Image: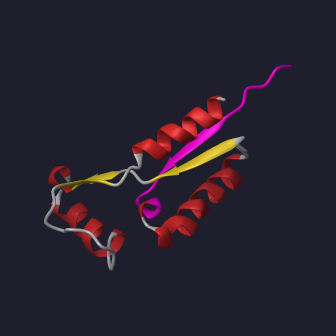
Amino acid sequence: MATRKTLLISVSLSAAFPEGMEEAQDYVTEMNMRTGLTPDSQILAAGAIRTGKYDYFAQQVVRYVVLRGRKFDPGADEHEFTDWVGLAAGISEFLG
């Protein structure tokens, strides 16, 4: 039976910060353990926040839990953390 190579792209705000990369990797490790999926390659992508679209509670969680102590303008309604060039490079590398 032929198999296909798999690429997992995990999107997490933890991946937006060097000190959060281990936590972002932990999410993937746990998902692999729970699902039995073992991708051939993986990319940890940072994603974005759109606080202008969140309710009050979600805004507070993002500001005081997710981004607590990190360099970020809490007054910004949107902030793109994704490294699009790096993401494209990772996908291109996977595709060969």
Image spot of residue 47 (x, y percent): 38, 50
Left or right: 41 with respect to 27? right
At a point 67% along the width and 43% down the height, the residue shown is 41
The type of colouring in the image is secondary structure
Which stretch did the figure color magenta? 1-15
| Residue found at the far bottom of this picture | 69
Image spot of residue 57 (x, y percent): 21, 65
**Which quarter of the picture shows residue 14?**
bottom left
Of residues 94 and 1, the one nearer the viewer is 94
| Residue found at the far right of this picture | 1
Of residues 21 and 63, the one nearer the viewer is 21
Depicted 11 relative to depicted 96: above or below:
below
Depicted 41 relative to depicted 60: above or below:
above
At a point 64% along the width and 59% down the height, the residue shown is 30
Left or right: 52 with respect to 13? left
Say whether residue 13 is magenta.
Answer: yes
Question: Quarter of the image containing the C terminus?
Answer: top right
Left or right: 57 with respect to 75? right
Left or right: 4 with respect to 19? right
At a point 35% along the width and 69% down the height, the residue shown is 66
Q: Number of marks in the image?
A: 0
Say whether residue 78 is magenta.
Answer: no
Of residues 72 and 68, the one nearer the viewer is 72
**Which quarter of the picture shows residue 29?**
bottom right
At a point 16% along the width and 63% down the height, the residue shown is 56
Question: Quarter of the image containing the N terminus?
Answer: top right
Image spot of residue 77 (x, y percent): 15, 56
Image spot of residue 81 (x, y percent): 35, 54
| Residue found at the far top of this picture | 1
